Image: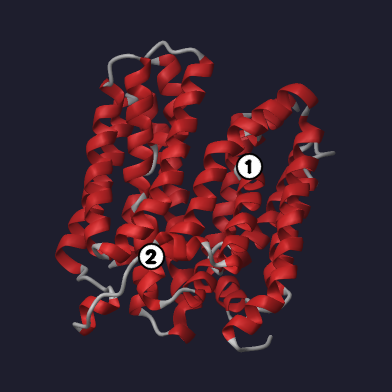
């Protein structure tokens, strides 16, 4: 039911990709004002990752999911009617924070529900559902936006509420201490932040995210500058989503069983190679080839890391550990589009893509250096 709810919610996640267009075309804001709102959404997502993880250990996974999905639906309904620039910024931040709090709660719940040896497959299925929804959502959002931008907010809010209903009806509390009826241990977020391997994974995730988010913010700009169309960019997105839907499950499951071997840094290195291929790219064929390369790396990395984090975490801090990991993605979501725009405007597309590839390459190197520590920590070898 978590997978079903995740698919429903991801299909309706259509506001953020169109938020800057809505604020400029419908609300009359300037481009800097609109991008500031999108960045503050990312700031809220960064905060929500930490807060949602801590709260899921403190009050339970189910309560956090209901709070996040219900509160996010409320704020996405407020956002298009927020009066004034500052109120819009506050609504965007709140939507990002509440709307993203459920993610660490869900990843912690998967670890609660699934035996350790089956977790790679479980996280792969959740990842597959996310991408299946992502293959449908943007196209659906584009159709709705041609009729009414307000329809995007209605769809996003409705799917969040639908996920909340799934949680309310079909998903019990999974926190081990509640299920076992044992006494609760103290939940301290600083305990997670003092775990050096976890912080290393979160930093590597941040670096990957800074490069990865360029694919959805800067890539359409660089393709347009090369004379390619919006349809061409849509096809690149379709290549990514199609590959994940077709082979994402077996690739992720295979990589998950080898996550303490060379496959983890190698998958990140593949993402870096795919980004670097866009430096000299000026044709659709080269952009498509790059998409195939970074998608393979994505499939072997993104669904594997939650498994790694869940195995690092003490049982009573599963949510907090996942929150630190999701905080890395949230910070990348906040900083990535802004930094990419600055580099693209000041130094051009080649500098942007080579710089993004360098950041992701550093993440691959960092993960390679972490492997011995992770193996020792988990008392296993690759």
Q: Under tag 2, what secondary structure?
A: helix
Image x and y of residue 229, in percent? 64, 29
Image x and y of residue 126, in percent? 42, 65
* In the image: residue 8, left or right of residue 171: right
Image x and y of residue 381, in percent? 67, 88
* In the image: residue 94, left or right of residue 262: left
Q: What colouring method underlies this structural image?
A: secondary structure
Cα gap from disc 2 to disc 1, whole angstroms: 29 Å
Q: Nearer the viewer, mark 2 or mark 1?
A: 2
* In the image: residue 290, left or right of residue 17: right
**Residue, disc 2:** 319
Q: How many marks?
A: 2
Q: For the point 79% across and 26% down, which residue is it? A: 347
Picture layout, residue 276 above or below residue 302 = above
Residue 141, labelled with which disc?
none
Q: Under tag 1, what secondary structure?
A: helix
Asked whether residue 78 appears in the rendered view, the answer is yes
Image x and y of residue 371, in percent? 69, 74
Foreground residue among 6 and 88: 88
Picture layout, residue 270 above or below residue 282 = below
Asked whether residue 228 appears in the rendered view, the answer is no
Q: For the point 78% across and 37% down, which residue is it? A: 283
Q: Mark 2 Cα within 10 Å, few/some/many (few <14, many 20+)?
A: many
Picture layout, residue 118 above or below residue 343 = below
Foreground residue among 8 and 117: 117
Foreground residue among 342 and 248: 342
Which of pointers 2 and 1 lies earlier in the amino acid sequence? 1
Q: For the point 73% across and 48% down, which residue is it? A: 359
Give the quadrant of the N terminus: bottom left
| 2 and 1 marks in contact (CB < 8 Å) | no
When asked about the image quadrant of residue 28, the answer is top left
**Residue, disc 1:** 215
């Amino acid at each position: 039911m978590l997978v079903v709810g995740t698919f429903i919610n991801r299909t309706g996640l259509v506001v953020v990709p169109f938020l800057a267009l809505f604020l400029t075309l419908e609300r009359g804001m300037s481009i800097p004002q609109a991008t500031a709102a999108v960045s503050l959404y990312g700031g809220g997502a960064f905060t929500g990752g930490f807060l949602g993880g801590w709260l899921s250990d403190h009050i339970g996974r189910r309560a956090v999911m209901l709070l996040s999905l219900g509160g996010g639906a409320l704020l996405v309904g407020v956002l298009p009617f927020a009066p004034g620039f500052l109120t819009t910024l506050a609504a965007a931040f709140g939507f990002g924070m509440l709307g993203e709090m459920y993610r660490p709660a869900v990843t912690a719940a998967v670890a609660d529900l699934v035996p350790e040896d089956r977790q790679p497959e479980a996280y792969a299925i959740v990842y597959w559902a996310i991408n299946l929804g992502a293959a449908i959502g943007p196209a659906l959002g584009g159709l709705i936006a041609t009729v009414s931008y307000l329809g995007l907010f209605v769809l996003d809010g409705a799917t969040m509420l639908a996920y909340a209903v799934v949680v309310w009806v079909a998903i019990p509390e999974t926190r081990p201490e509640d299920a076992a009826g044992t006494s609760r241990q103290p939940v301290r977020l600083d305990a997670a932040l003092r775990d050096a391997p976890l912080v290393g994974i979160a930093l590597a995730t941040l670096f990957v995210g800074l490069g990865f988010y360029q694919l959805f913010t800067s890539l359409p700009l660089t393709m347009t500058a090369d004379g390619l169309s919006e349809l061409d960019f849509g096809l690149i997105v379709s290549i990514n989503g199609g590959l994940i839907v077709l082979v994402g499950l077996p690739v992720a499951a295979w990589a998950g069983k080898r996550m303490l071997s060379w496959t983890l840094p190698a998958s990140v290195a593949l993402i870096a190679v795919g980004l670097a291929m866009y430096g000299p790219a000026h044709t659709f064929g080269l952009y498509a080839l790059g998409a195939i390369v970074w998608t393979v790396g994505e499939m072997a990395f993104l669904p594997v890391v939650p498994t790694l984090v869940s195995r690092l975490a003490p049982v009573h801090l599963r949510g907090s550990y996942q929150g630190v990991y999701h905080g890395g993605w949230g910070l990348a979501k906040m900083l990535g589009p802004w930094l990419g725009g600055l580099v693209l405007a000041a130094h051009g597309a080649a500098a942007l893509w080579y710089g993004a590839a360098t950041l992701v390459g550093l993440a691959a190197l960092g993960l390679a250096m972490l492997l011995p520590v992770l193996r020792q920590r988990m008392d296993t070898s690759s």
